[in-house]
Amino acid sequence: MVWTLSALAERVDGQLIGLADFPISNVGTLQNAGADAISFLANSKYRKYLQTTRAGAVIVSEADSDAVVGNAIVVADPYVAYANIASLLFPQEVVAEQGIHPSAVIDASANVDPSAGIGPQTYIAAGVTIAAGVQIGPGCIIEKDVQIGENSILVARVTLNRGVKIGQRAMIHPGVVIGADGFGIALTQGRWIKVPQVGSVQIGDDVDIGANTTIDRGAIEDTFIANGVKLDNQIQIGHNVSIGEHTVIAGCVGIAGSTHIGKYCAIGGGTGIAGHIEICDQVQLTGMSMVTKSITEPGTYSSGIPVEPTREWHKNVIRYRQMDKLQNRIKQLESQILEK
């Protein structure tokens, strides 16, 4: 799509600098954008590229507007403005046209709104309710009694197991599985037996779920993902987990069962979170953190050792193993000093 700079500036409540009717049809980085593209500056370390960028226009804050050469849109938050402009230039593609593809298999008792789109090779079981404007792409499996709210999108090969409830405007990417059995087992007489997982999963409104993420159904009560949560790819969420509103979670995070995560948290990639703990609102966990106990105060938390040359890492591991001996030696020296 092609937009004029003046139209884009109006959409993001920005101040236009330059040619109002300049056409923009693409986006790009400050280093590599072409004349048809708009770029943005949200990190001061890239400010040096404002002088040399070939972008047709840039999105900047007022503090950086004096360094602009050419067209610009001045806003309070350049990254947010860029996100909104990119959405205008590249609107969400339709994954399933309105109507039902001839190859789809739909149980007669399913309630599919006429405005919904059902793609090829999709299976919809008994008792399913699909609301207005829903798009279900190819190869999806919707099991018994699932509910999908208005204008939600299942891109492709999504599996929603029995009784799962999806809110409005959800975006669910390929390979996602919601509502598979949680890891419930009990040891008896030397062997493991399965504990039935009789809960389900509830997904709120405006939730994004990245490719190949899995969300287990509850063992007794439901697993719950609140409104506005954004999940990256390949995340594992165990049974009976609850995640508060507008929390964001990066890729390859593992969350064990019955953990409760608050609102507006940000969890870095590769983080592992133990089960049966609570994380309060507004907690940020940096990447590769390991959380083994509850966090009750908002703030930023980290764990793990950042990468370093192998030789230095070996030295530090040896020192770590000697900490008990060092602590005992310090105690002995303190005792000797006190005796004197």
Image (tube, rainbow, N blue to C red):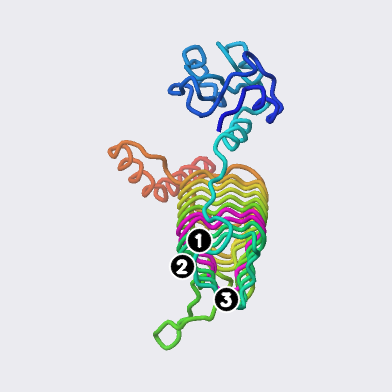
Q: Is the Cβ of the residue at disc 2 closer than 8 Å to that at disc 3? A: no
- Mark before the other along the chain sequence, 1 or 3: 1
Pointer 2 residue? 103
Relative to residue 236, is residue 38 depicted above or below? Answer: above
Q: Let me know if residue 252 appears in the view.
A: yes
Pointer 3 residue? 144
Considering the numbered disc 1 on the image, is that residue within a helix, a strand or a loop? Answer: loop
Task: Give the residue type that dot 2 points to.
Answer: Ser
Considering the numbered disc 2 on the image, is that residue within a helix, a strand or a loop? Answer: loop
User: x%, y% of residue 140?
Assistant: 49, 64
| Distance of label 2 from label 3 (alpha carbons) | 19 Å
Pointer 1 residue? 119
Considering the numbered disc 3 on the image, is that residue within a helix, a strand or a loop? Answer: loop
Magenta span = 150-179
User: x%, y% of residue 239?
Assistant: 55, 68
- Mark before the other along the chain sequence, 2 or 3: 2
